[in-house]
Image: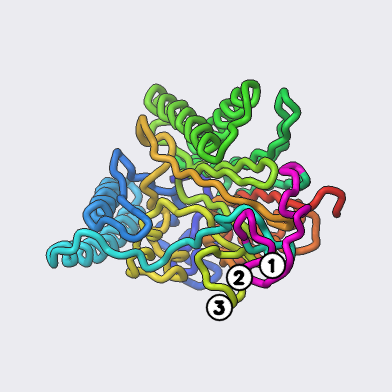
Amino acid sequence: MQPNAPPICSLCQRPLAAGGTGTVCTVCGMSVAAPLQPHDGIHVSGGRRVRVDAESVSLESLQSLVVASMAWWQQQLHHTDALTRQNAAEAIQQLSQILASLSQQLAQGRDVVKITTRLPQVRRYPQHCARCGAGNREEARFCRVCGAALAPAARRRPPNAVQVSIAACTDAGRRRTVNQDVVQAEHLTTLHGDTLTLLIVADGMGGGQAGETASTLAAGTVRAELLVHMTQSIPPTDTAWQAALRTAVQSANTQVYQMAQSDARYAGMGTTLTVAVLIGQRLHLAHVGDSRAYLCNRAGIADELQPAHTRPPAQIVQLTVDHSLVARLVDIGQLTPEAARTHPQRNIIYRALGGQAQIEVDTQSHALSHGDLVLLCSDGLPIHVEDHQLAELVLTAQPLAARCQACIAAANAQGGSDNIGVVLAQLTATGTA
C-alpha cells in the first residue's frame, strides 16, 4: 500500500479529483465512502512452489498458492481503512470460488491438469533464413519453410557480424507517485575485447522506498556479478551462460533477502527480475516474477515445432513465463488470456526476489537473427497493452528511444495503473542502418 498514491475510484478506476470532497467520483458519479489506494503486487511465496512442467500443472501446489493468497487477504481484514477491509472481503470471495473449483477436481482424483496454453519453441536450429527468419539445421542448403537458398557465407556468418541498438525508459504511470521500476540497457566490453549487451528490468514491491530499494539493489547486484565474470572468461556455451546468470540472480536474491530481514524499514520487500544478455547472435535470459521478455521481428518469429506453411509466423513471442496465479489459471483453462489481463487477483505472484533465502530461477537461450528486437518490460505495460499492439509499437522505423516512449504513452492512455518499464535491443547486420 502506498499512502501517497492518488486515490482511485473503485468503480471506474480513475484517479479521484485532487481537493475534492472525497465522497463522489467526478468521472462516473460513484459514491466514495473512502478512497481506494492502488497496492503493490502481492508476493505469497513463503517457500511454496507451483509445480509446472512442459505439459501440466500440479493442482495441489496451485491450491496451496490460492490458500496462501487468501491468508494474505485475511490479514487485510483487520486494516484500519474500511475500504481496504471491503476489498479484502471481495478478494477472499473470488479466491474461495477458485479454491472450490480446484478442490472439486482434486476430489475427483485429478492431481495434475494438462496445460492448455504453451509458449512456442523459438529457433532451436542455428542457421537462419534471411528471407523468412526460420531456423534450419547447420548443414541445410535450403530453408525448410520458404525454400530460399542458404548461402554458405551467410550460414557461417561470424558471431559478431551484428550491431545492437539499445534504449530504456521508465515511468511512474498515472496512479503512482513512486516509481519502483528499474531499467538498464548497456554495452559492456570484456578484457579480451568481446562485446555483450546487458538488459535488465526489475519491478519492486513493498511500498515506496522499500520496493524501489529492492529493485535497485537487485539490478545493481546482477550487473556487478556479471562484470566479475567478464574479468575472468566469457562463458563458452549456453549452459555456462545460464549457470552464470542463475548465480548472479541468486546473489541478488540474497542481498534483497538479507536487507529485508535485517532492517525493519524494508521488511517484506521484494522485486521481480528479468535479465537478458545478447552476445553475437545468442540471447541468454534469466527470469523471476511477472515482468516479461519478448522476441519481435517484422518478418515473423519462426516456431520450430510449427508445421511449415500452416500459418504466418507471429511477429511477437513472449519468451518468459509469468510466475503469477492468473497465469497458472490460464494454463489450466480456468481463465482466458484476455480475462487474466484485468483479473482482480492478477497482482498475486508466487516467485520474487527477497521473499526467501533461496529462489528458483528460469533460464533459457535462443538464437537471434538480423532484425530481431528483444523487449523487456514490467507488468505495467502488458496489463494495458496487448501483445499485437506491442508489436505494432516496437516494430516501426522510429528510433528505439521513441518506441520506448510510445509503449509508455500507450499504457498510460489505457489506464497507467502501475509503473511502466521498457527496454529494447535490436539487431542489425553490421554496416546497415
Q: Nearer the viewer, mark 2 or mark 3?
A: 3
Quarter residue 358 falls in: top left
* Label 3 crowd (10 A; few <14 / some 14-19 / many >=20): few
Apparent side of residue 80 relative to residue 142 in the rendered image (left or right)? left
Q: Amino acid at mark 3?
A: Thr
Q: Is residue 148 magenta?
A: yes
Q: Earlier in the sequence, mark 1 or mark 3?
A: 1
> Which residue is depicted at the point 62% across and 52% down?
126
Residue 57, position as x, y percentages in the image: 30, 58
- Residue 209: numbered disc: none
Total label count?
3
- Residue 310: numbered disc: 3
- CA gap, disc 2 to disc 3? 9 Å
Residue highlighted by disc 2? 313
**Magenta residues: mostly which secondary structure?**
loop
- CA gap, disc 1 to disc 3? 14 Å
Q: Amino acid at mark 2?
A: Pro
Apparent side of residue 76 relative to residue 133 in the rendered image (left or right)? left
Classify mark 1: helix, strand or loop: loop
Quarter residue 388 falls in: bottom right
> Which residue is depicted at the point 31% across and 65% down?
114
Residue highlighted by disc 1? 132
Q: Earlier in the sequence, mark 1 or mark 2?
A: 1
